[in-house]
Image (cartoon, grey):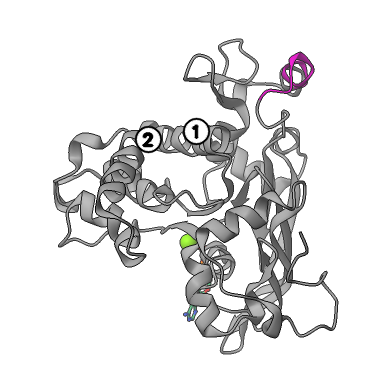
Amino acid sequence: MTRDVPPFGSSRNVANTVRPLSREMAQREMQSVPGEALISLRDVHLGFGDREVLQGISLDVAHGETKVLLGETGMGKTLIMKLAAGLIQPDSGHVLVMGHDVSDMPEKELLNFRRSVGFVFQEGALFDSMTVSENVSFRLREEAVDETEIEERVREALRFVEMEEALEKYPADLSGGMRRRVSIARALVDRPPVVLYDSPTAGLDPVTSQTIITLILRGRDLQDVTALLATHRVQDAFGLANFRFDKGSGRVVPLAGNGKSGLAQSLAEREKAAEGGKERNEAQPTNVLVIRDGKIYFEAPADELLSTKDEYLKKFLASAE
Ligand SMILES: Nc1ncnc2c1ncn2[C@@H]1O[C@H](COP(=O)(O)OP(=O)(O)OP(=O)(O)O)[C@@H](O)[C@H]1O
Ligand SMILES: [Mg+2]
């Protein structure tokens, strides 16, 4: 299958060749380009007034990968997530998602594109006047999906985040962690190939944060979701790096299978796990990007972050202890 968008750097007029993208089309296209990055930013610049917040950001998220974008508050994580979702456009550079150049897409096509990407907003962004069920089904209703199917999918999505019993509740009746679960169900309900999690653990206690990370790794390992996850918590990166969802037992297990978790797991143990079998996405490591002062400051598998000598990065590790 040929792709609509020329390789980056081509002078072809992308805007004229991109066609509207339904979720089903997005999934078909995604299957046609295995091994390629599903999300790419190329030298992206974005500023406000005389302040350039993003000063040449380039990143790739491979098919099936959940990449972690780690950064302190105000570094531009949310801006990057919104760029990838086509909610905002860069001052310069390119944003390529599922083979489409989002940074050069006419507004009409962007409307379609946005529907093909799951977005978990930093604040959850649930509609307070709607029940959980109405919140989760909102996008399916917009797409005029059949009512019986809507009910099935909403239940399935809420079961996935273990919130089925909250169907008829309102967001105000839920805890912060529960609201975040509902936001994840809403993002996953129409099975998007790409999901953007914007600080999904912000404001949650450590235990609740880990349950959210567990849901995200289930999405990665069970639903083959490709994701970018913004966070200021280094623990989120290690939660994703050290656990996998075991399809056989239907449980989340430590990647090395030795009962250790979190920061305790050493590089040697990870390597042993990788040798032992290509289980989670062919033992694809969890890669971490650190954004600092408008640039990608560090990019490597989570393990390498553990052994860093860099003072700035050590600060992140210390914040997790
Ligand atoms: N519409 C806007 N107008 C002006 N400045 C903006 C706008 N949106 C974002 N900014 C600025 O860009 C910077 C990056 O914001 P962003 O929300 O992406 O940070 P963040 O890394 O997500 O932070 P946090 O961890 O607190 O969520 C901030 O300094 C913010 O004030
Ligand atoms: Mg943010």
Q: Residues within 10 Å of mark 2 (few under 14, many from 20)?
A: some
Residue 16 pos. (x, y %): 69, 85
Q: Residue at x 73, y 54 (%)?
A: 37
Q: Which residue is mark 1?
A: 218
Q: Is mark 1 within 8 Å of ligand 2?
A: no
Q: Which residue is mark 2?
A: 160
Q: Residues within 10 Å of mark 1 (few under 14, many from 20)?
A: many
The residue lying toward the viewer, choosing from 69 and 127, is 127
Residue 272 pos. (x, y %): 76, 15
Query: Above or below — where is 83 with respect to 231?
Result: below
- Which amino acid is tagged 2? Phe
State the extent of the magenta-drawn residues as a range.
Answer: 271-279
Rendering quarter of residue 314: top right
Horizontally, residue 174 falls left or right of residue 54, namely left
How far apart, in angstroms, are the residues tagged by discs 2 and 1? 9 Å
Q: Secondary structure at mark 1?
A: helix
Residue 246 pos. (x, y %): 55, 20
